[in-house]
Amino acid sequence: MSYRHPGRDQIRIEDVLSALGNRLRLDAVRVLDAGGEHNCTSVLNVLGVTAKSTMTHHWRVLRDSGVIWQHPSGRENMLTLRREDLDARYPGLLDAILTGATTDAAQTPS
């Protein structure tokens, strides 16, 4: 299976903001921001999501908006944050969003 990813110049701010406006997708991006390539299962485990089907839609939204790279590798899909592309298109945006998400998470009562 091959996935469609927008080119760097096709990434649009409204798509990125919409994709990151969902708490589960934002949390997934926070996991991917650690760097490197992650399989879907490892991200799901960190997020506490038990069903892969739950994230299928979210991966597509993140991929189609240009936030992540996704490619098959055997029986898994591998995910990578497109930080370089996002930073080139919108300098400082991803850092501001991730910092805000971390601050909000720290202030939210358990």
Image (cartoon, rainbow, N blue to C red):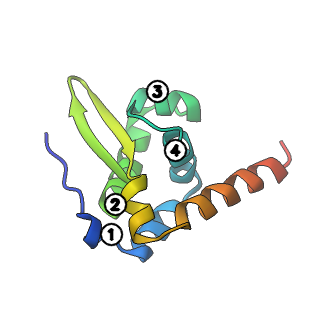
Q: Report the Cα–Cα distance between label 3 and label 2.
A: 21 Å
The answer to which of marks 3 and 4 sits earlier in the sequence is 4
Asked if the residues shown at circle 1 and circle 2 are in contact, with their CB atoms under 8 angstroms apart, the answer is yes
Q: Which residue is mark 3?
A: 42
Badge 3 vs badge 4, beta-carbon distance below 8 Å: no
For the residue marked with disc 1, what is the amino acid?
Ile
Image position of 34 (left or right of 7): right
Q: Place residue 85 in its image quadrant.
A: bottom left
Q: Nearer the viewer, mark 2 or mark 4?
A: 4
Query: Residue 83: horizontal and vertical position, in percent?
Result: 43, 53
Tell me the residue at 84%/52% (across/down).
107
SS at mark 4?
Answer: loop
Judging from the image, what secondary structure is the residue with disc 3 in?
A: helix
**Residue type at numbered disc 2:** Gly
Disc with the residue nearer the chain's start (3 vs 1)? 1
Question: Which comes before the other along the chain, label 1 or label 2?
Answer: 1
Question: Is the residue 86 above or below the residue 71 in the image?
Answer: below
Please, what secondary structure does the residue beneath circle 1 have?
loop
Identify whether 74 is placed above or below 60: above
User: Amino acid under label 4?
Assistant: Asp
- Of mark 3 and mark 2, the one earlier in the sequence is 3
Residue labelled with disc 4: 33
Badge 1 is on which residue?
A: 11
- Helix, strand or loop status at disc 2: loop
What residue type is disc 3 on?
Ser
Mark 4: few/some/many CA within 10 Å (<14, 14-19, 20+) = some
Q: Position of residue 75 (x, y in %)?
A: 24, 23
Which residue occupies 39% across, 33% down?
Answer: 40
In whole angstroms, how far apart are the C-alphas of marks 3 and 4? 14 Å
Residue 73 picture location, percent across and down: 22, 28
